[in-house]
Image (spheres, rainbow, N blue to C red):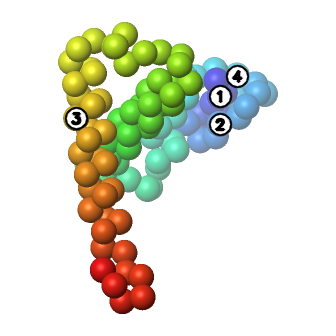
Amino acid sequence: MPFAQRNEQGQIIALFNEANSDAKEEVSASHQDVLAFLTKGQFNEEETKAYLSQTDYDMIRVVEDVIDLMIKKNLILLTELPAAAQHKLITRKRLRAKFLLEDTLLIEDDNIL
């Protein structure tokens, strides 16, 4: 966890990997003050919420890919997951495969579709 240096108003003005004379307070990387410091001047509250929503969708894809990898490596079986999760994963996999197939049909080779 990082160590924070704060100003007189209590706002974080610097973060360090190790404690020092100016930064003795250990704070969680996900602490609200740390996030405010890291995004200062970059995002307003609405933009931050929108960014978090977008990264939620990205993380869903990461989780799907991790589950697929674990299944391929026989670390888990698809059937070990709850039925609802199995259904959702299979449905999404079929939809992605369908769109991937449609995209490859549009590739031109020697002016032949």
Residue placed under numbered mark 1 in the picture: 2
Question: Do the numbered discs 1 and 4 sit on residues whose CB atoms are within 8 Å?
Answer: no
Amino acid under disc 4? Lys
Q: CA distance from mark 4 to mark 2?
A: 10 Å
At 76% from the left edge and 27% from the top edge, which residue is drawn? Answer: 18
- Taking 70 as reference, is 108 above or below it? below
Task: Tell me the amino acid under the disc marked 2.
Answer: Leu
Which residue is tagged 4?
Answer: 24
* Snapshot quadrant of residue 27: top right
**Circle 4 — which element?**
loop
> Which is in the foreground here, disc 3 or disc 1?
3
x and y percent of residue 53 in the render?
A: 29, 42
| Upstream in sequence: badge 4 or badge 2 | 2
Q: Residue at x 56, y 24 (%)?
A: 73
Q: What residue is disc 2 on?
A: 15
Q: Earlier in the sequence, mark 3 or mark 4?
A: 4
Q: Are marks 1 and 2 in contact (CB under 8 Å)?
A: yes
- The nearer-to-camera label among 4 and 2 is 2
